[in-house]
Image: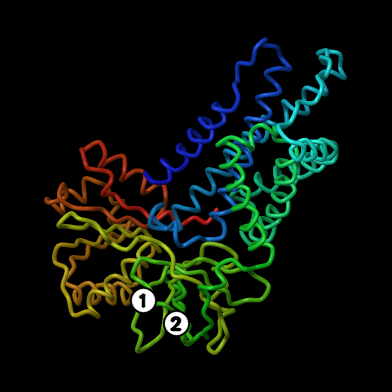
Amino acid sequence: MRNIKIALWGFLLLTTGLWLLADTLWPQPLSYFAFRGVFVQYSGVIAIGAMSISMLLSVRPVWLERTLNGLDKMYRLHKWLGIVALVSSLLHWWWAKGSKWMVGWGWLERPARGGPSGSATQVASTLETWLSSQRGFAEELGEKAFYIALLLLVLALVKYFPYRLFIKTHKWLALAYLALVYHTVVLTKMAYWRQPIGWVLALMLLAGTVSSLLVLFKRVGKSRQVSGSVAQVAYIPELKVTRTDIRLTPGWKGHRSGQFAFVSAFSDERAHPYTLSSAWDPKNPMVQFITKALGDHTSTLHERLKPGMPVTVEGPYGCFTFDDTPPRQIWVGGGIGITPFIARLKEIAQRGEQAPNVDLFHCTTDYDPPTMALLQADADAAGIRLHVLHTRNDGHLSGKNIRMAVPEWPNASIWFCGPADFAQALRSDFNRHGFPMQHFHQELFAMR
């Protein structure tokens, strides 16, 4: 979380700082319309900049994973930038459009327009004249694109909007974004393009435009996709869990335990992200996914998936790979959040290693003795201490429970995968007890 917070504030502070080098929010003489003129420019730069970086993150750039600590964190930053774009574009729209309404209502008096500013060269003058001729169309197009983007951004933030519809409609933002790029190029002050804010803005617009085209032409993650077929499907009704084994064709680069992949099995649905629950063995190119029935899609997987069915797997992604410096590790898997730890158990055992410095806590409301026996066997093979809490009988896991079971907790790192509210409770508890939070690792497995 720390890296993406730094990235978000870095974007806001850098963009604001560069803009202030080119303009001011305190124009002289100060008046409503003088402030409106500069604030519309500033809010527009922030809005389109946030959308541009958000578009870049939407194409899953692997080269940013290490910097931002995984694609799951990148999607959280993508969401935050969407909120920044939503708020700043609303302000931009109101100061631009609302001011005109208030003039029409007689609340404000529009000042006389000044003449066009001069240009340093004839080429600049010609370009400025052409851009000036496009202002009316750019304003109209930008307004319509704003309404579309506003609706799509709001739908993206509404958790009750079905994921399958979210995936289909969210890509329309790429078209709205391209319209807003044209709006930005035409209406941004000409003087900005000759200064650092203009250079950075141009770079963001270029990155966002290329990313939008990749989305529209369905090229996202294409180079990381491998075809395969369903080898086996097993359903555990007591846990409402489906275990799917997929045999891959050559091309999979391998994965580390804790990573995830996007899987597409049905022509009428986009790819869904799932944590890989198996260790990678190049001699046996199989991957396994364990999915919990949490919605319309996952509830029917065991009925729809059939052996031999072709699938596409894209990845791997994520940095939840158990890399840290403390001598001990504490793993906490809440419910289906146990999957990355299953993969890690198998990976350790497959290497013929032991990890006695690891404690694994698994909390579950649904309990299936045969499944728990398999988990215990995997833990024993890896030399890891397993603590299982059946919450209906044993209550909920707390920071106090963990500290009592692992006295060496101050010298450990914590790896958590599970419900967000559970994670927040543990974070707050350990933070109060002086635990260094840079060693608390959480997978943010939410793609919206």
In the displayed structure, would residue 69 be above or below residue 307?
A: above
Residue at (26% x, 72% y) in the render: 345
Expressed as whole percent of the image width and height from the top left, the position of residue 336 reads 40, 64
In the displayed structure, would residue 139 be above or below residue 378?
A: above
Q: Which residue is mark 2?
A: 245
Residue 426 quadrant: top left
Residue 202 placement, left or right of 259: right
Residue 126 quadrant: top right
Q: Label 2, secondary structure: give it.
A: strand
- Circle on res. 278: 1
Residue at (63% x, 48% y) in the render: 205
Nearest to N terminus: mark 1 or mark 2: 2
In the displayed structure, would residue 271 be above or below residue 229?
A: above
Residue at (30% x, 61% y) in the render: 362
The kind of residue on which mark 1 rests is Ser
- Circle on res. 61: none
Q: Do callouts 1 and 2 mark residues in contact (Cβ within 8 Å)? A: yes
In the displayed structure, would residue 7 be above or below residue 242?
A: above
Expressed as whole percent of the image width and height from the top left, the position of residue 12 reads 51, 35
Residue 268 placement, left or right of 246: right
The kind of residue on which mark 2 rests is Asp
Q: Nearer the viewer, residue 280 or 222?
A: 222
